Image (cartoon, rainbow, N blue to C red):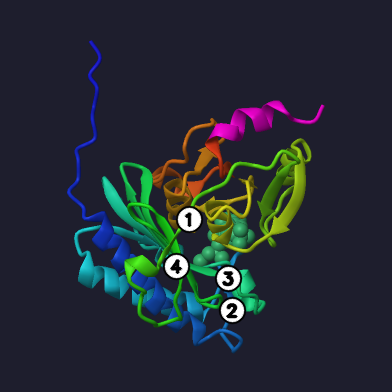
Amino acid sequence: MSVQITPKPLSLNYRAIAEDFAELAVAAGAAVMLFYNSDSHAREKGDTSPVCDADLAGEAVILAGLAARLPDLPVISEEAAAAGAKATCGDAFILVDPVDGTREFLAGKGEFTVNIGLVVHGEPKIGAVYAPALEQMWLAGDHAVTFPVAPGGKLPPPEQRQRIHTRKPDQDGLIALTSWSHTDPRTSAFLENLNVKQRRMIGSSLKFCSLADGSADIYPRFGATMEWDTAAGDAVLRAAGGIVLDRDGLPLRYGKAATKFMNGSFVAWADPAAIQATLGARRA
Ligand SMILES: Nc1ncnc2c1ncn2[C@@H]1O[C@H](COP(=O)(O)O)[C@@H](OP(=O)(O)O)[C@H]1O
Ligand SMILES: [Mg+2]
């Protein structure tokens, strides 16, 4: 006899948590911007990616805010994990990346983001992706929205937020997104096999947001990422109608403590209905 284990429902107020995440991301954005285009003391971490004072300042704002507002939810954050903090997660937990795209931040490019995501039973359910230099937020709770907001500014009321949706690919080919800094040969080989009409390089989790708001079709990622890099953007994309599939073709799961929260390769798609047709039409 097989026993089906149904996840216990959790009573979480998604709308209120999404507002908390957005407010904290905007507050962290203000802390991060204090170091933009100034000396932010960049150094290398264990995975050879850079960290600077902006990452630590942004993370401190978010962790203090989460401890005050959502003290019952475990938090796993990029810089605390890199510094060796012991990470545990339960049925619901929060993933924090105070600066995704630290390389772009250090280069003075605006394509970096503050990311706060909520994972419930392995799925990203809420996400705030905030680009402080671009002064734009992408937020997923019940649905996906975007709106302008300055670092440290007040969030606009819900009626001034723009709903976003993914798009169907054009007949004449896909718009594909890749990283500025981490595009590996497997990513290029994958895209060479598809009917891609345009490739755009974008830093950070903004790639998920570009799929979510109907600006592009596909984002393949074969190089390393961590769960905190992707959870918030993945939540925004899913709420806008897209999907992120792992190497087995299943929705990317979160809470992979055994691999220290590292993701395997994945492909983010704007239009799940077009996946079969897209892969079926691969070049010979
Ligand atoms: N060797 C590696 N191991 C783990 N993560 C890596 C990595 N190389 C790049 N990344 C992740 O890729 C992210 C940047 O993605 P992109 O190139 O798409 O902007 C980095 O985010 P951080 O800037 O937060 O460190 C980092 O987490
Ligand atoms: Mg980071």
Q: Position of residue 226 (x, y in %)?
A: 50, 54
Report the mark closest to the observer, 1 or 3. 1
Q: Is residue 101 visible?
A: yes
Q: Which badge, 3 or 2, is on the more N-terminal residue?
A: 2
Placement of 262 over or under 2, stated as above or below:
below
In the image, 212: left or right of 184? left
Q: Amino acid at mark 2?
A: Ala
Label 2, on which residue?
A: 42
In space, the residues marked 3 and 4 are separated at their CA atoms by 12 Å
Q: Secondary structure at mark 2?
A: loop
Q: Quadrant of the N terminus?
A: top left
Q: Are marks 3 and 4 in contact (CB under 8 Å)?
A: no
Disc 4 residue crowd, few under 14, some 14–19, many 20+, Cα 10 Å: many
Q: Are marks 1 and 4 in contact (CB under 8 Å)?
A: no
Label 4, on which residue?
A: 79
Q: Are marks 3 and 2 in contact (CB under 8 Å)?
A: yes
Q: Position of residue 172 (x, y in %)?
A: 76, 41
Does label 4 point to a residue whose CB lies under 8 Å from ligand 2? yes
Q: Which badge, 1 or 4, is on the more N-terminal residue?
A: 4
Q: Is residue 47 visible?
A: no
Label 3, on which residue?
A: 102
Tell me which corner region of the image, top left, top right, bottom left or bottom right, holds residue 51.
bottom right
Membership of 141 in magenta stretch? no
Q: Amino acid at mark 3?
A: Thr
Q: Amino acid at mark 4?
A: Glu
Q: Secondary structure at mark 3?
A: helix
Label 1, on which residue?
A: 164
Residue interval drawn in magenta: 273-284
